[in-house]
Image (cartoon, rainbow, N blue to C red):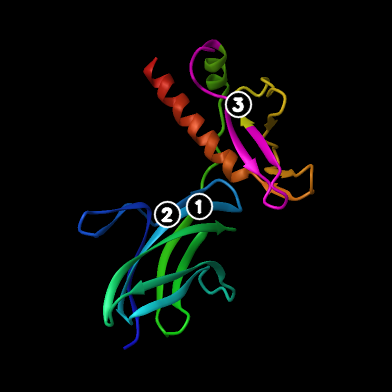
Amino acid sequence: MKPTFGSGLLFDSYNETANKKINGLGAINIFRAWGFPSFRQATALISIFNLRKGSTTGEILLRKPHAIDKQSITSFTVTTDSNNSCMTAVIPLSLKFNEKGRHFIYAIFHDYKSTLKIPCIVELQKWPTFSQEERQFVRKHRNIPLGPIRTNLTCQQCSHAYIFEENILEEVLPPGGVTRFPKSGEFECTECNETIYLKDIQGQIRFSLKQMLSNIMRGQ
C-alpha cells in the first residue's frame, strides 16, 4: 500500500463544514502580475489516497515547463489514524513568480513515487496609466476618496520598515516618513542596501486607483 495523489486545485481560501468537508473558495488558474518578481498567496487542496497509519510527508515545488530547476515552495505533513485512508490536504502556498507564462505546481512525497501536477498561468498586465482628463478630474474634485494609497513594506534582509505611496496627481508630494514609489520599480534599502522590488505592488495599487476613478467618473 503506497499513498497516491488524486487531484489538486488552487483557491483563494477554503472553509470546513460541520461534517468536516473541505470546500475551496475562489478557484485560481491565472495569476495577474504587473511586474516581477511577483508574490502571490494561494491555498492548494489536494486529495490523497491509500495513506498509511501515521504521518506522511511531502513537498510542493514550482517549475516552468521544460525547465530543469524547481523552486521549493513548502513541505507538508498529513496524519491519519488508520491504514488505507484518504483525505484532502489543505496546504497554504506563498508563491514567487519571476516571469510570465505557464507554470506547474508539483506535489511529491518524500518516501513514495507519486507526483501531482497543477497548472497555472501568470499573465503580465498592461501598466495602468492616468490620462490628462483623469488627472484634471481629480484636481477639480478634491473631495472624492481617491488616495493617496499607502502600503507598509519590510526589507526581507534586515526587516527595516518603509511606507510607500501612490498618488494619481504626481505634483502632490508625500508627507515626511512616506516614500513615493520609484519609477524604476526598485528601491535600495537604506539600512542594508538590499534591493526591494516594488513594480508589481505599485501596479496593483495603480490598477485599483484606475478602477475606482473610472467608476466615479462614469457616475458623474
Q: Position of residue 162 (x, y in %)?
A: 68, 37
Q: Quarter of the image containing the C terminus?
A: top left
Q: Amino acid at mark 1?
A: Arg
Compared with 10, 167 (above or below) is above
Q: Residue 9: x, y in percent?
A: 35, 62
Q: Which mark is residue 40?
A: 1
The Cα atoms of the two marked residues, 1 and 3, are separated by 24 Å
Spatial distance from mark 2 to mark 1, Cα to Cα? 11 Å
Determine the secondary structure under disc 2. Answer: strand
Q: 90 and 198: which one is in front? A: 90
- 155 drawn magenta: yes
- Spatial CA span between label 3 and label 2: 28 Å
Q: Can you identify the residue that label 2 sits on?
A: 30
Residue numbers of the magenta segment: 140-164
Snapshot quadrant of residue 76: bottom left
Q: Residue at x 55, y 69 (%)?
A: 72
Q: Residue at x 40, y 25 (%)?
A: 215
The numbered mark, 1 or 3, whose residue comes first in the sequence reads 1
Residue 23, given in percent of the width and then of the height, sits at 27, 56
Q: Nearer the viewer, residue 14 or 208?
A: 14
Q: Which residue is mark 3?
A: 167
Q: Is residue 155 left or right of residue 69?
A: right
